[in-house]
Amino acid sequence: MARGGHPGMASAGMGDTLSGVIAALLGQRLSALDAALCGVRLHARAGELAGRQHGYGLSATDVSAALGAAWLSLTSE
């Protein structure tokens, strides 16, 4: 099982960010299952990248700002 994310993601607003990512993927016509699976991985990767930059105590804004880089990171693997 793949693991991901960052412990600093345990803060207010992370669930809202995740639900926004999943909603955006649903808007791209992914199935609910695929949107959830991809959304969780993308959100986790963004948290990893934000954690490298900001350390612990991440805000939802930190993670949101890292979504583009996370997308590029995951799609280039």
Image: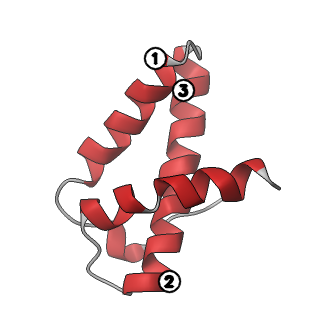
Do the CB atoms of the residues marked 1 and 2 lie less than 8 Å apart? no
Residue 11 position within the rendered picture, expressed as x and y whole percent measured from the top left: 22, 65
Circle nearer the N terminus (2, 3): 3
Q: Residue at x 48, y 54 (%)?
A: 67
Q: Residue furthest bottom?
A: 55
> How far is mark 1 from mark 2, CA to CA?
30 Å
Of residues 63 and 12, the one drawn nearer to the viewer in this rendering: 63
- Vertical order, 21 against 65 (above or below): above
**Image quadrant where one finds the C terminus:** bottom right
Identify the residue position indicated by label 1 in the image. 27
Q: Residue furthest left?
A: 12
Of residues 61 and 18, the one drawn nearer to the viewer in this rendering: 61
Where disc 3 sits, the SS reads: helix
Q: Is residue 1 visible?
A: no
Circle nearer the N terminus (1, 3): 1
Q: Residue at x 50, y 26 (%)?
A: 25
Q: Residue at x 38, y 87 (%)?
A: 55
- Vertical order, 17 against 31 (above or below): below
Q: Hey, what amino acid is under mark 1?
A: Gly
Identify the residue position indicated by label 2 in the image. 52
Question: Where residue 70 is drawn, which disc sits there?
Answer: none
Q: Mark 1 packing: few (<14 Cα in 10 Å), some, or many (20+)?
A: few
Do the CB atoms of the residues marked 1 and 3 lie less than 8 Å apart? no
Of residues 63 and 8, the one drawn nearer to the viewer in this rendering: 63
Identify the residue position indicated by label 3 in the image. 35
Horizontal relation, residue 46 to residue 10: left or right? right
Q: Hey, what amino acid is under mark 3?
A: Ala
Horizontal relation, residue 27 to residue 77: left or right? left
Residue 56 position within the rendered picture, expressed as x and y whole percent measured from the top left: 33, 84
